[in-house]
Amino acid sequence: MDKLRQSGITLLELLVTIFIAGIVLGLGIPSMVEFQRNARITTVANDMIAAISVARAEAVKRRAPVTLCPTDDPAAAAPACVVGANAGWVVFADDNDGNGDGLPDGNGTIDAGEDIIRVQPFPNGVNVFADGNYISIAATGFTRDIPGLGAGLNNFLFCDVRGNRDLGGGNSAARTITVAPTGRPQVYRDVARVAATLGGCP
């Protein structure tokens, strides 16, 4: 009668397998972390481009100012504009007739009755810098300055822990957005442009 054959692996085979798995993980995990960082910062920049584009389209459609401002609580039921906040941005129809003259006020403040059009939260791990505290789009689709609030912003800078590191081909790990006077936003990622925007990543 044949003996029952037992199958399995030896200790040496197990050690070799663990060693190879360690090498694969050692190479793969840093690449995955880099991929996640790239995806996160690209998503934040693209979402901001979308928010500005929506604001421009809504201003033209409504024939009234639409404003974007920073907020410290983008998840709030009624988010408020907060100068210097870095949690996110809110897009709202700046069109409530608060003084009874029949004209949109466009004062850069979220007043009662003004529609919240879009809220843009920023994820942890991405720092957002800007050269102003608001973007306001007139009914023409062009940017406008709000009396009493100073000039509207023209540039955003998005940075993470990598700063303005060259990822190859002159492409930066950071992103910058420039808003033209026509209200059209454009995103850039070349190292030289990032370095020249708001002093570059800290």
Image: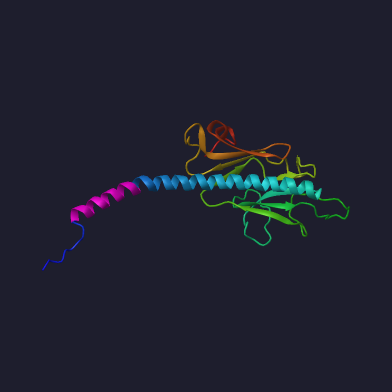
Residue at left offset 67%, top offset 58%? 79
- Pinpoint residue 196: horizontal percent, then vertical percent: 58, 32
Residue 14: percent from the left, percent from the top? 23, 55
Quadrant in the rendering for residue 186? top right
Is residue 8 visible to the viewer in this orientation of the structure? yes
159 left or right, relative to 119: left
The region drawn magenta spans 11-25
The one of 151 and 20 positioned closer to us in this rendering: 20
Q: Nearer the viewer, residue 140 or 69?
A: 140
Main secondary structure of the magenta stretch: helix
Q: Is residue 149 magenta?
A: no
Residue 13 to residue 195: above or below = below
Left or right relative to 67: residue 199:
left
Residue 15 is inside the magenta segment: yes
151 in relation to 124, above or below:
above
Give coordinates of residue 8: x percent, y percent. Answer: 21, 60
User: Quick one: quadrant of the N terminus?
Assistant: bottom left
Residue located at (49% from left, 31% from top): 169
